[in-house]
Image (cartoon, rainbow, N blue to C red):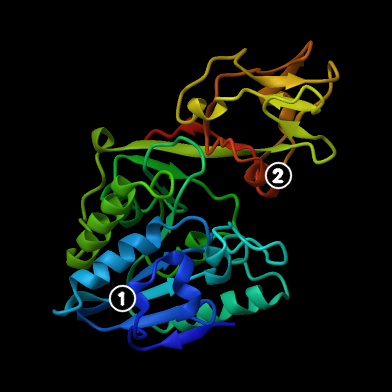
Amino acid sequence: MLHIFDQLPHGLLERDATRLHEILPGPSLIHLAGQKTDTLFISVLLHGNETTGWEAARELLIKYSKRPLPRSVCLFIGNVAAARHVQRHLPEQPDYNRIWKCDGDSPEHHMARQVIEEVSKLELFASVDVHNNTGKNPHYACVNRLDQSYLHLATLFGRTVVYFIKPDTVMSMVMAPLCPSVTVECGQPGMIEGARHVLDYLDACLHLSAFPEHPVTPHDLDLFHTVATVKISPELEVGFSNESDDICLLPDIDRFNFNELPAGTAFGQVRTPGKQAFHVRDEQNQDVSARFFETNGRWIQTRTPVMPSMLTLDLDIIKQDCLCYLMERFPLG
């Protein structure tokens, strides 16, 4: 499935995400030489409806179309077939950000293995995987290691940083052993400020000569640790306003993202009193549902203070992936 180029295909920079399929026959790896030989790996469009990464990468390459790149770039453009239809992934496809553990036998898993083989040959400076959120979230970076170079790479994007080790099938996880690696979450698709933020960030990465040797200071960083994943019980129907649904979530539930919520905060209601609505698993894949949530009558409420992220109003995302992640503050030192 993977297509490899050693220069920009003609006409690529003239296409938005929905038209990349006109130039690229599928997932593509593009090697571009720069003045510094150590390579910045950039990944965009692992989810076809998260277009900010491509918009920023395209503007970056247009900027350097008449002059040398400050550093070599390896650009991975992921799910162009889904991008054509503005979908996270097509019905017959796996999620392109859940294949990088390479523990499956699908064409996409084979493609992921080939990408890893190719980039492992490079002298890598850093890896940046660009994503959007579907709900209301601040811009933030994610790391899978707490090494100082990874934290410096993350805080170059912003002071809000999330550390997680689950899910372990994401691209940043497989890149982490190779070089400092981050995922950047830059708000909802189509927002000009998101593309500008990522463009400035990638340009800064191109010019960075090395990562500072001193530790990131605590006052420069708001570090959170993802401790659990919340999913809807698969046998239950979920919605936001239909009383016939098994679960009726609050219609503005994404306002909870990155807010520290007290115990007793309601996430919604269940049609059947006492019914377990959420399945919550920690980093060791243990069921910790009873630690975080309870059903009080029909109300689904938190049992302990929590800080959620990635709550969304998109029912497809909730069903395909998860309702949200739960975080706690992670002190440095």
* Quadrant in which the C terminus appears: top left
The amino acid pointed to by label 1 is Val
Instruction: Say which of 87 and 138 sits in front.
Output: 87
As helix, strand or loop, the secondary structure at mark 1 comes to strand
Q: Where is residue 256 in the image (x, y as percent from the top left)?
A: 51, 25
Q: Where is residue 198 in the image (x, y as percent from the top left)?
A: 30, 55
Q: Residue furthest bottom?
A: 6
Q: In which quarter of the image is residue 79?
A: bottom right
The amino acid pointed to by label 2 is Lys
As helix, strand or loop, the secondary structure at mark 2 comes to helix
Is 126 displayed left or right of 280 in the figure?
left
- Of badges 2 and 1, nearer the viewer stands 2
Q: Where is residue 144 in the image (x, y as percent from the top left)?
A: 47, 53
> Dot 2 corresponds to which residue?
319
Crowd band around label 1 with a 10 angstrom C-alpha radius: few (<14), some (14–19), many (20+): many
Up-down relation of residue 199 to residue 317 (above or below): below
Marks 2 and 1 sit apart, C-alpha to C-alpha, by: 35 Å
Is 118 displayed left or right of 104 in the figure?
left
> Dot 1 corresponds to which residue?
73
Crowd band around label 2 with a 10 angstrom C-alpha radius: few (<14), some (14–19), many (20+): some
| Identity of the residue drawn at 22% across and 55% down | 200
